[in-house]
Amino acid sequence: MGSVASAFVPERFRGQELEWDVEREGLNSFSGVSIWEDGSAGPVMRFERDGIGWDLVGVDLVGVDRAEF
């Protein structure tokens, strides 16, 4: 993880790797769902079709309390 991005990761998750899985939501959207090494829910990235490409339309910070930042 880059030094800039690591400032946005709560202390308890720093140094952990994420495992990603793709969940299809029909033909025009999908989510990249992640889990931290310790089994905690990680960020979810949501994508929607844009012509023949894909756009990132949202990021959910699952399992993170704002007070941790």
Image: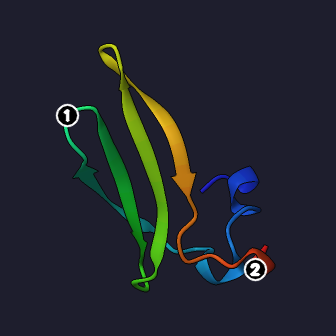
Q: Which mark is residue 10?
A: none
In this view, 43 is above or below 58: below
Residue shown at the point (79%, 80%) measured from the top left: 67
Q: Do residues under tags 2 and 1 come within 8 Å of each other at their CB atoms?
A: no
Q: Residue 26's x, y, as percent?
A: 20, 41
Give me the residue at 64% from left, 84% from top.
12
| Dot 2: element | helix
**Classed neighbour count for the residue bearing mark 2: other residues with Cα under 10 Å, few (<14), some (14–19), many (≥20):** few
- What residue type is disc 2 on? Glu
User: In this rendering, would 56 be left or right of 52?
Assistant: right
Is 18 on the left or on the right of 28, as rendered? right
Q: Relative to residue 40, is residue 19 depicted above or below?
A: above
Q: Position of residue 22 (x, y in %)?
A: 27, 52
Q: To which residue does mark 1 refer?
A: 27
Find the distance from the CA under tag 2 to the CA under tag 1: 36 Å
Residue depth check, mark 2 versus mark 1: number of the one nearer the observer: 1
What crowding class fits label 1: few (fewer than 14 Cα within 10 Å), some (14-19), or many (20 or more)? few
Check disc 1 and report its element: helix, strand or loop.
Answer: loop
Q: Amino acid at mark 1?
A: Leu
Q: Is residue 3 above or below residue 17?
A: above
Quadrant of the rendered image containing residue 54: top left
Residue lying at 69% horizontally and 79% vertically, measured from the top left: 65
Foreground of the two, 63 or 14? 63
| Quadrant hosting residue 51 | top left
Residue depicted at x 51% and y 74%: 16
Mark 2 / mark 1, whichever is N-terminal: 1
Which label number is shown at residue 68? Answer: 2
Rendered location of residue 69, percent (x, y)? 79, 73
Q: Is residue 55 left or right of residue 53?
A: right
